[in-house]
Image: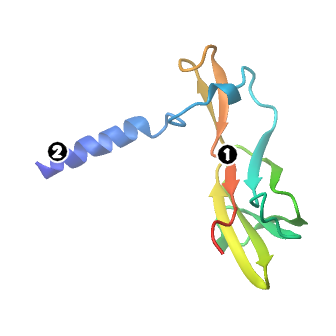
């Protein structure tokens, strides 16, 4: 009995693992294949923006220590050119009231061609959002 449940679960996972995002917002869907792909990095809450944030972008996991970019910004959001299906890890270093906080998130920008959900067939970029906003002090 247990082997049957495990086998059915594995088959279901394999059938549904390559279908792209579960939800496609049709307002972000484009009829033409996107010419540029971006990482959308959310850095700070509007009410508590520090003077500057040190952002480091890594290729792959942070443990590999392959730094692509390092910059300081005061922006709340930042768009960064990216490549499809490449793993990115981004860290942000904040200083609030003399205390240092580091936030880390990962993304692998991907694209999905949607034929049925929206009014017209279109392309949708997903898994390209990095959320580095601090939630608690």
Give me the residue at 74% from left, 26% from top: 33
Give me the residue at 78% from left, 65% from top: 48
Q: Nearer the viewer, residue 110 or 119?
A: 119
Mark nearest the camera among 2 and 1 is: 1
> Marks 2/1: CA distance?
35 Å
Q: Is residue 117 above or below residue 55?
A: above
The residue sitting at the top extreme is 119
Q: Is residue 105 left or right of residue 38?
A: left
Give me the residue at 79% from left, 85% from top: 98
Q: Residue 75 falls in which quadrant of the image?
A: bottom right
Where does label 1 land, which residue?
A: 109
- Around disc 1, counting alpha carbons within 10 Å, would you say few (fewer than 14), some (14 to 19), or many (20 or more)? many
Give me the residue at 61% from left, 26% from top: 113
- Around disc 2, counting alpha carbons within 10 Å, would you say few (fewer than 14), some (14 to 19), or many (20 or more)? few
Labels in figure, total = 2
Mark 2–mark 1 contact, CB under 8 Å? Answer: no
Q: Is residue 8 left or right of residue 103?
A: left
Could you tell me which secondary element the residue under label 2 belongs to?
helix
Could you tell me which secondary element the residue under label 1 belongs to?
loop
The residue sitting at the left extreme is 1
What is the basis of the colouring in this image?
rainbow
The residue sitting at the bottom extreme is 98
Q: Residue 97 falls in which quadrant of the image?
A: bottom right
- The first of marks 2 and 1 along the sequence is 2
Tag of residue 61: none
Q: Is residue 2 left or right of residue 41?
A: left
Q: Position of residue 118 (x, y in %)?
A: 59, 19
Q: Position of residue 19 (x, y in %)?
A: 49, 33
Q: Position of residue 50 (x, y in %)?
A: 83, 69
Tag of residue 4: 2
Q: Is residue 95 above or below residue 34?
A: below
Q: Position of residue 47 (x, y in %)?
A: 78, 61
């Amino acid at each position: 009995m247990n082997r049957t449940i495990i086998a059915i679960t594995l088959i279901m996972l394999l059938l549904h693992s390559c279908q792209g995002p579960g939800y496609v917002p049709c307002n972000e869907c484009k009829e033409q294949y996107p010419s540029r792909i971006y990482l959308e990095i959310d850095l700070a809450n509007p009410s508590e923006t520090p003077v500057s944030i040190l952002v480091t972008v890594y290729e792959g996991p942070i443990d590999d220590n392959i730094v692509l970019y390092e910059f300081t910004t005061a922006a709340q959001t930042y768009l960064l050119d990216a490549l499809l299906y490449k793993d990115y890890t981004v860290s942000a270093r904040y200083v609030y009231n003399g205390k240092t906080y580091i936030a880390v998130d990962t993304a692998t920008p991907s694209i999905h061609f949607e034929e049925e959900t929206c009014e017209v067939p279109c392309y949708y970029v997903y898994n390209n959002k990095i959320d580095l906003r601090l939630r608690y002090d």
